[in-house]
């Protein structure tokens, strides 16, 4: 449990585990979003990752309510090795818009990936993107035809974003893009269920300083 792990690292009181589990169970908003568990079986596939920022995923979360800033989509970027993620609010899903944000928000910060994985979208298979792959020597891989959910890691992350935003957006849901930055502070400082480390630990070698750390002085 991510909440339990974060609390254990910073605080302690008698029966703190029972208190936290009770607090999480009684969160009605979280329970409503979580829904019933489904015991689905999926075919196992091996994915060779390699090293940080060598293999990344690219997806578009759509469509979302148009915000007051004019954004309707979220460009989701993920590093498979560290699970470091970005999501950039964008007004449209034109190939030029997506390519520009890919370079600005990812490649300029973390370098050029060796492999880029995405769904079989006309955007990621456009002439512009194919030229980008060629210029930067990026190997392009695709999800299984007619089964975009075959990339379960990205699909789960997209659901995590939506679950978080649903708890904080206004009634009209026109401010979801303003809540993305603090979502990533929470996500990057939480232990990942596969690696057992936070993505911040794997990138920076240390934990992020959180607002709750101020209470500790």
Image: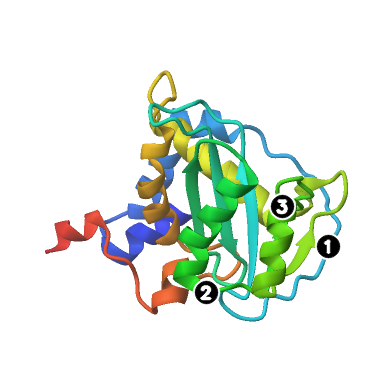
**Mark 1 or mark 3: which comes first in sequence?**
1
Please count the marks in the image.
3
Q: Is residue 173 above or below residue 61?
A: above
Q: Quadrant of residue 129?
A: bottom right
Quadrant of the rendering where the C terminus is positioned: bottom left
- Asked whether 40 or 85 is in front, the reply is 85
Q: Is residue 194 shown left or right of residue 3?
A: right
Q: Give the labeled residue for mark 1.
A: 44
Q: Give the labeled residue for mark 2.
A: 111
Looking at the rendered structure, the secondary structure element under dot 3 is: loop
Looking at the rendered structure, the secondary structure element under dot 2 is: loop
> Is there any visible trace of residue 27 in the rendered image?
no
**Mark 2 or mark 1: which comes first in sequence?**
1
Q: Position of residue 95 (x, y in %)?
A: 64, 47
How far separated are the C-alphas under marks 1 and 3? 25 Å
- Asked whether 107 or 180 is in front, the reply is 107
> Is there any visible trace of residue 140 in the rendered image?
yes
Q: Is residue 77 shown left or right of residue 70?
A: right
How far separated are the C-alphas under marks 2 and 3? 19 Å
């Amino acid at each position: 449990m991510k909440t339990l792990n974060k609390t254990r690292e910073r605080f302690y009181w008698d029966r703190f585990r029972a208190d936290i589990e009770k607090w999480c169970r009684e969160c009605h908003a979280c329970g409503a979003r979580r829904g019933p568990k489904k015991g689905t079986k999926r075919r196992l596939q091996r994915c060779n990752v390699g090293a940080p920022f060598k293999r990344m995923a690219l997806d578009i979360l759509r469509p979302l309510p148009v915000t007051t800033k004019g954004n309707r989509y979220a460009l989701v970027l993920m590093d498979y090795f560290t699970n470091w993620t970005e999501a950039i609010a964008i007004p449209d899903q034109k190939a030029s818009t997506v390519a520009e944000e890919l370079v600005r928000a990812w490649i300029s910060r973390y370098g050029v990936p060796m492999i880029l994985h995405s769904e079989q979208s006309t955007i990621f298979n456009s002439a512009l993107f194919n030229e980008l792959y060629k210029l930067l020597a990026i190997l392009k891989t695709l999800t299984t035809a007619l089964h975009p959910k075959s990339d379960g890691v990205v699909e789960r992350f997209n659901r995590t974003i939506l679950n978080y935003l649903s708890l904080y957006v206004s009634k009209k849901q026109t401010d979801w893009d303003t809540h993305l930055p603090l979502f990533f502070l929470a996500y990057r400082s939480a232990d990942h269920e596969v690696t057992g480390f936070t993505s911040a630990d794997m990138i920076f070698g240390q934990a992020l300083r959180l607002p709750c750390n101020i209470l500790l002085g």
